[in-house]
Each structure stands twice: as structure tokens, then as C-alpha cells.
Amino acid sequence: MTNGIDEISGADFILAIGTNTTESHPIIGLQVKKALRKGAALAVADPRKTEVASLAQHHLQLKSGSDIALLNGLANVIINEDLYDREFVSGRTENFEALKESVAQYTPEYVQGITGVSAGVIREVARGYAGAKNGTILYTMGLTQHICGTHNVLAVANLAMLCGHIGKESSGVNPLRGQNNVQGACDMGALPNVFTGYQGVALDEARAKFAKAWDVAALAGEPGLTVGEMMDIAGKGVRGMYIMGENPVLSDPDGGHVVHALESLDFLVVQDIFLTETAALADVVLPAASFAEKDGTFTNSERRVQRVRKAVEPIGDAKADWEIIAGISTAMGYPMGYCSAEEIFDEIAALTPSYAGISYARLEEGGLQWPCPAPDHPGTTYLHKDKFVRGLGKFSPVEYIPPAEEPDQDYPLVLSTGRRHFHYHTGTMTQRTGALEEFYGEEYLEVNQNDAAKLDICDGDKVKVTSRRGSVKVQARVGDVVPEGMVFTSFHFPAVAINKLTNAQRDPVAKIPELKVCAVKVEKD
Amino acid sequence: MAEVSLTINGKQVAVTKGTTVLNAARQAGFSIPTFCDDPELSKVGACRMCVVEIPGMRNLPASCVTEAMDGMEVYTDSPAVVEARKTILELLLANHPLDCLTCGKNGECLLQDYCYQYGVGETIFTGERHTYDTEAENPFIVRDMNKCIVCGKCVRACAEIQGKNIVDFAYRGFDTKVTPAMDVPLSESECVFCGNCVAVCPTGALQEKVLRARARTWEVEKVKTTCPYCGTGCNFELNVKDGQVVGVTSCNGDVNGRALCVKGRFGYGFIHHPDRLTKPLIKKDGEFKEASWDEAIGLVADNLSRIKKDHGSGALAVLSSARCTNEENYLLQKLTRAVFGTNNIDHCARL
Ligand code: SF4
Ligand code: SF4
Ligand code: SF4
């Protein structure tokens, strides 16, 4: 996020794209509600009638996967009606002419044809956002899990820069992170192309720095494989895998393909707190400690580094993940003798400029938002204040492309997936709480009433959902939460392993799979 | 900012204009009891426990809704004030089940604290008592409206923190009750079970179901930590008894204040779930067998080393975790890059 979470309540126009904020990020949702109580306007772009959409002045029920058309349409109105921030555009950005040219064809009427959102609403939202003192854009996976996910994000950035709604308190571009430490995992270099703090593996000086710190002769400069690519060549190029705390069998698209990939490995080791669907395929399973049983830090969506504190001893013989990793390293001839998580954190801070000023001692006083380059630096609540990381912000024109798999005669409905309030991710934890699963014990498929009538499906009927890749059975919930032509469910329930159906087609840049759109058919079971 | 100067119990005090008498007194180090006041919620002046004596003012004003004025003279513990507070407590006790021995909030209850402080143990008032059934049919929250002192904090927390308006006052007079619309149980309302009402309730009327059944308030050790679920990063306190996490309570989180969602507040049961892995497992002939750490680590190291030797570093790949700590993610990429010799590391950030 470019802003802090509490700054959301200071916005006077919030554009929430593909985020059911109040359900997926309930406490961030409270900030949105707070802004509304203070008189802010809210526009929600989501095909579904979500809870947050019900709070909005404008609910843009756009067709799945048509976000770029919508965003370009908003930019079109803002430029044509001369509502953009000239000072910001001339002083802090470049490539404006190219953007202007590319969005010229996205007139509200043209965009209405693609998205299904009326031209009048597009104009109103464009005027509202451009005219706001503080405009904030929120988005999550609803925007990024498309083959054009990277372009979607660029289109959002274009819009924010056009109106100067970035680099200010309560004005910014705010992706909300789904998992507790996605931000931290990225910051720490658990990515194929960067070390900690986004220092590129391809940069000679970065490699030299880490090689020296780690006392190795050399480090590979070639970026590695992404998770999808690993699965594609498992058993061929990739022979051995080490998976820590992830459950790709349920969370990744085209689950059948993932199982096959992992089974074809020579050796698979999985480290987790439960025997997940992925761990069941392993040759060796290592029992890890849960968050309550270890020390460490998480970094949240607003880049705030916060302490995790050990409250109880690890269950049975389980060990903290860091202790297990160190053990394996030592057994492979590279001794790691860390005595505490703090010792590891100090090493991170020494190698990572944006974390350099953070220490456990300082975190005792409260969390710190990176960049925090020095021990006396207060941390950074919002980014891009006077300039962007690259200097001038560059407008990147992007074109709408339709989803990779559109409905057709055989598979006439669009399946979209997401999260539910009472559960989390693949359900490994929330299905075992003695409370959440008791209250919300069975997943269902949202079906529009008109489609249901055509398919002769009643509320509560068991239905079979089938895509070109697989099928699952699930109970139908008939209503108007989803528009005609769309069905929706979550991926929290192993019994409804919806990712057997989803499409592993990936965005060519960020390699994010298109989990939000695939074509399915639904039949009464 | 403009200041006003007043005397409280004879002590000269200067505060910013607009400060309530209650806050002025607290800033000056005098404690005043309150049931319905909360710094995060709107002021209603409903419980009247915070009354003070201000010569020249009619009756005893509620200090939480009285603005401190220049030259004001305030007495927070005069005989009249103490008498008024005792009467309020006696009236409350007259209609309160005195089952502190078995109440889960015993030791963390303002009614109990103030009765102790003001020496109110019995009540001269007799009369009708409520006989509501306890509502315990959802797995998260127990509601015992017999213990409700109608302070309205839960109503305001639901409306002003959670933005939901699930509970409100219903009926009138003696029958006044805090309840969802149509007096249905919470589970039949639109309640999202954030428990933010429970976190502000001063008595045992609203309780966390599991926590309060498993530990007396003074038996738990509280450890502040960060939520393991979504990327908001709420802080809360794990309540630990006999080496087990028995519940979660709010603390003053950087991001969330006292607010939590249902997952953070009530989703901790997985920690001690019987399905937890407790021993390393090695697959032999398609079946998992328990193993020692030495054996398991040795096997992992041997296999990974062998693959690296036979097929090169690029034949190894690692998935790190958006659920694990920074330290663990750092260490795993260090292992991957420095020891395995490859950049084949990723995690499910894209999912
Ligand atoms: S649990 Fe949350 S939503 Fe339900 S009544 Fe209490 S504050 Fe309102
Ligand atoms: S339930 Fe608790 S918070 Fe709500 S009015 Fe009664 S005593 Fe106050
Ligand atoms: S308490 Fe809820 S909103 Fe807060 S971090 Fe946990 S899951 Fe997210």
C-alpha cells in the first residue's frame, strides 16, 4: 500500500476495485465505513453484490475481466473533461501524451459496451474521483488474478497519477494483501528475481554484497522459476522441492495438474503445521510450530513490521520453521547457528536498506513502516511523497484484452472465486478452530436466480460444476449476489476444491494465474 | 490551543478547552468510576457513575458530558458524590445475579470493582429481577442479559466501531434490553461475530464463550502478538493458561485499536487441534512413519544434496510462505541461494 491503513478513513472518494473489503479485510473495512460516516463517496467495481458494494453510492457491476476498459474509460472522461491535475502531470510524470492517445477510444459509450456499466455512471465516478481532495484506490486479487493482472495495476496507477492522487496522506494506490505476511515474504526475497528489499539478483553489486555477507564464492544471477513454472517442469527440469507452509494443491489453479507435478518429483519435503493435501504427497513431512509457538515478525499490507511473540511451547516435537531450515542447512554442510529469531532479524536489517533502522528493541514500542533506513528514522506512513522511486512517474498505456477463457456453448457460465468472512485461504486453520467451521460449516455456490430457473436449480440443491479441467459438487445458493451468467464460490473448503476447475493461464509479466475467470457449466447433481 | 483553568479537589488544573471534566480529573490524577464512558465511543452520560459535585450547578452533573470551564470548582469524591454512586450500585445489584463465584468475568468486571471500592455488598432495594435465558447457541459469544447494566457500550461499539447496528435497546423501563432487531439470537441476525461488543462490555453480560469457560481471569498470562490471518496485521493478546492458548483478547493494536474480526478473535482453536503434526514423518512404501528429527533432516539433506550433484542446482525448487515470519522467509531464500545455488524460490503471493 502506498498509504497507511488509518489514512483510508481520511479519503473523500474511495474507489474499491475487486475487493470485498468488509469481508476479506474486515478491519480495513472499518476504515472505509469510517470514511463513509465522515461523508466520503464510495464506488465499488465488482460483478457481485458484495457487502461493501451495498454501502457504495456507485456499484459498478462490471463484466468479469473488463477492468482495464473501465479504468481507461475513467481516464478518458477525466482527460476529455479536463479534470486532471495539470500541475502533478507536468511536474511529476512523463508519457502523458501516450496515455491520452491510448485512452481516446475508451469513450464511456464504448466502455459501456465492454463492461456493461452505464456511460452515465462512468462519467459520474470519473468526476467524483478526479474532483476529490483525497482519492484512494483499493484493490486486491479481484484485480490481479487475471491474465492481464499487471496491466490492470498499471491502469490503476495511470488513473491515480492523472489526478495527482498519490504521494499524499489519504491519497494513493492501495493493494490489500490477502495473507498475513505476503508483504514480508516479498520483502524478504522469497521471489525468483530479488534478494531482500527488492535488490535484484541480476545486479552484480547486489550479488557481490550477499555473497560476501553469506560467505559463499558466488551467487546465481539468473532469475529463478515462479511457482507456476516450477509446477510445469516438475519431474523434468525440477527434481526436488522444498515447500514450507504452503498448500498449492488447493490454492493453485488447475489442482489436478499440481498433484501430478508434485507426484512426479524425485523428492518432496513439506514443512507445515498440519498434514495438508500437499504434505500428503511428500516423502518427508517436517512438523512446524504455529505463530503462537515462535518469535518473529510479520509485515502487513501497509508495510508495517510487527512482532510475533512466542506464547506457548511448540506442540509435540514441532520446531519453529527457522530452526528447521537452519538444521537442514547445517546438515548440507553450510552451518547456520542462529540462537534466536532476533539474530536473524539483525542480519536482515544489516542487508536491507528499507529495514535498516528496525530492531526488536524498537518494535517493543510498536510497529514500524518501511522504508525505515536508520535507527532514528520514524518509518514511512505513505510512499512517493516528493518523487517516485524511478524519479518521474511514467504513464503506461494499456489495452483491454478479453479473459483467456470466455464462456461458450459447452461452458456457458463464468466461474469466479474468492474469500468468505468466516474462513481463510485453503481452510487448513479455519476448518480446525472448533468455532468458525461450526458456525459456517459448508460451502456453497452462488447462482443467479435467472440462471437457476433456466437450469432448474433450487436453493439448496446439490449441483455439479464442471470446467475443461475438472469438476466439483457443491450446494447451490440461488439469489442475486452474482449477476446472470456468473457463479461464485470460495477456495476455503477442501471438499469443494474449486481450484481443480480454475485456469492456470498466467499473466505474462507477474505470472499470476487467472483465478477470477474461467468458463464452467452447472448441472443439477 | 486555548486552555481553561479549574480546580479539582482543591488542585489547580489547566486543560485544553473542550476537555470534559472527567478527562480533566483523570489528567490531574483523580480516578472517577464510569460504566458507559469509552474514549473511542460517543458520549452518552447514561450510567451516571461519573457524577461529581460542582458548586453552583444543579444536582450532580455527569462529568463525562460536562465541559471543563474556566474557574470551575470540582469535587470528585464529596459525601454527596459517594452517596449517589452507592445508590446507583445498589440499584444495579438489586437486579443482578450475584453469581460471581461461577461468572467467567469474575476479576475483570467493573460492577464488581466498584462495589468493592464503595463497599456495596448488599442492596436495600428489592423488587423484580430479570429471568432471561442465557443465549449460548453460537460458538463464539455468550449473552446473559440478566447481567446487563444497560450501559449501551455494546450498542455504540457495534454502530461506531463495527458499523453494523446489530444490537440496540429494545422495550422500555425495567424491560429495557439490548438485543438484535426483533429480539432474535445473534446467530439469526446479521451479526458478523467480531466480538467488538464483547471487548467493551464492563460486566459478564457478554463473554467470549470458550475463553471464559476455560480460565479464570487471573489465571491467564497475556502475550501480545500479531494476527496470523489476513494482511491487515491486527494485534491482539493470546491468553495462555497451563501452556495452552485458551483465548484471544483485544489490546491497543497499532492498526486495529481494540477491534478484531471473527477470525482473529475466535480463530485460534487450530493451535492445539489434535490434527497438528507433532513428529517428523517419513514415507515408506506409500505410508507415513514417525521418525526422529535427526533421521528426517538427514534424509532431506541427503536427497537435496544428491539431486543438486546429479542434476545441478536448477533441479531444486523452493516454495516459501506468506504465512511464515520474515525471519523464516529470509532464511529459506538464503538456504536456496547460498546452499542450493539457485534462485528457484517463490511463494503464493500471486494467489
Ligand atoms: S459481534 Fe460484532 S457485529 Fe455482532 S453484535 Fe457484537 S459488535 Fe455487532
Ligand atoms: S451487554 Fe454489556 S456493554 Fe451492552 S449494555 Fe449491557 S452491560 Fe453494557
Ligand atoms: S483480526 Fe481479522 S482483519 Fe485483523 S488481521 Fe486478523 S483476520 Fe485480518
Image: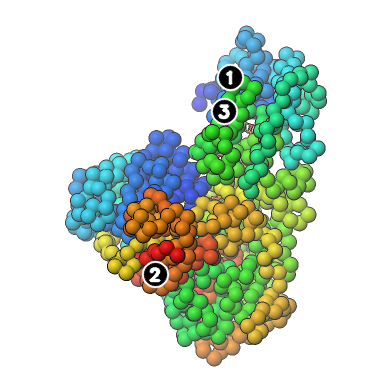
Q: Please, what secondary structure does the residue beneath circle 3 have?
A: strand
Q: Amino acid at mark 1?
A: Thr
Circle 3 chain: B
What's the residue at 50%, 64% (across, down)? A496
State the CA–CA distance, disc 2 to disc 3: 51 Å
For residue B66, which numbered disc appears in the image? 1
- Say which amino acid is labelled 2: Ser
What subunit carries mark 1?
A: B
Q: Identify the residue under disc 2.
A: A467
Say whether residue B256 is visible: no
Q: Is residue A82 left or right of residue A131?
A: left
Q: Is residue B142 above or below residue A430?
A: above
Q: Nearer the viewer, mark 2 or mark 1?
A: 2
Residue holding disc 3: B170
Left or right: A85 as drawn, with respect to B236: left
Q: Position of residue B8 (x, y in %)?
A: 67, 19
Label 3, ligand 2: CB separation under 8 Å: no
Quadrant containing ligand 1:
top right
Amino acid carrying label 3: it is: Ala
The CA span between labels 2 and 1 is 66 Å
In the rendered image, residues at marks 2 and 3 fall on the same chain: no
